[in-house]
Amino acid sequence: MILRYLFINHKYSIVLTYFLTILENLLELLYPFVIGVTINELLKNRYGSLILLICMWLVHTITGVSRKIYDTRTFNSVYSHLVTLVVLEQNKQGIPKSQIIARSTLTREFVYFFERDIPEIISALFGFFGALVMLFIYDIQMGFYCLTLLIPLFIINHIYIGKSIELNRKLNDRLEDEVEILTDCKSEKVYQHYQSISKLRIYLSNAEAANYGLMELFSIILAVVILVRTLQLPGVKPGDIYAVISYLWNFLQSFSNIPFLVQQFSRLKDIGDRVKLKIS
């Protein structure tokens, strides 16, 4: 498995980037709570909590800048290693040059997975589990309301996964034929080729948009229920209201990237089936 191979051979540098990503997300998770406490303290003319907020903000900024700088160096090195391996191995297997060129480009998706998708997954998990735990702390009933959103989430994405796999397979079939079609350079074939690619990408985008739209409808309902419940909490303070709304927003935002991530997993699965490497 290519993903496993990449991780094993670059594990230390990759783990460090994810450590910084986790630290960054942990600090982001604490923001609503700290800001909520700060609001409540400021309303009492107490300013000491501002120091904690400022210090946390500075640490979060330094962590984010460090991660971005280190990520670029790490994953460009990973890509150079992988694409060289793919080209040489595919050539040994006697794969046509046109397909090797296409697959060397598609291989970039595996590096994107580590560089972009896993941090997105980490952020989504923090947004989901972290926000859910905090909402349970503020009110158990609100926590259970949030859990009900998992039912439509599962049903919608179960349907979406099958559609995404099928469309990505057809799209990658087209991309593998691209070099050969452009080499022949017959106007009708070139036109049909790009029309097909355009249609498939539109279908993928429409499927992703439909997934997102359906989830947003359920999110709106949940948001209204949580807001009403928050105002009914006994002794609720302005800072608490802010924190609950922020954690609710984080919880709902954790679902926003699911359609994109499902599509990426489908795309990687198909690319992995095409790019067979003899990895020891």
Image: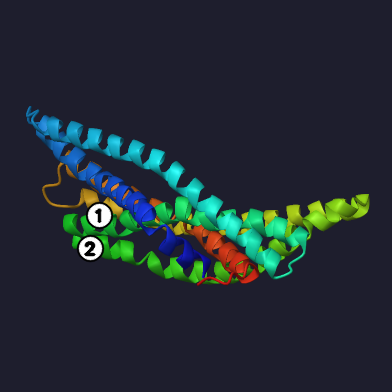
The amino acid at mark 2 is: Gln
Residue 164 picture location, percent across and down: 61, 65
Q: Which residue is mark 1?
A: 229
Instruction: Depth check: give the residue in front, 114 or 187.
Output: 114
Q: Mark 2 to mark 1: distance in Å?
A: 8 Å
Mark 2 is surrounded, within 10 Å at the Cα level, by few (under 14), some (14 to 19) or many (20 or more) other residues, namely few
Q: Which residue is more in the foreground, 261 or 77?
A: 77
Q: Position of residue 231 (x, y in %)?
A: 22, 48
Is residue 251 something that shows in the picture?
A: no
Disc number lying in front (2 or 1): 2
Q: Nearer the viewer, residue 228 or 72?
A: 72
Residue 184 x %, y %:
90, 54
Give residue 132's quadrant in the image.
Answer: bottom left
Mark 2–mark 1 CB contact (< 8 Å): yes
- Give the residue at x 26% y 49%: 26
**Helix, strand or loop at disc 1?**
helix
Query: In the figure, 57 relative to 28: above or below?
Result: above
Q: Is residue 128 above or below residue 43?
A: below
In the rendered image, which residue does mark 2 sit on?
Answer: 141
Q: Is residue 250 left or right of residue 50?
A: right
Identity of the residue drawn at 19% across and 31% down: 54
Crowding near the residue tagged with mark 1, few <14, some 14–19, many ≥20 C-alpha atoms within 10 Å: few
Q: Is residue 131 left or right of residue 162?
A: left
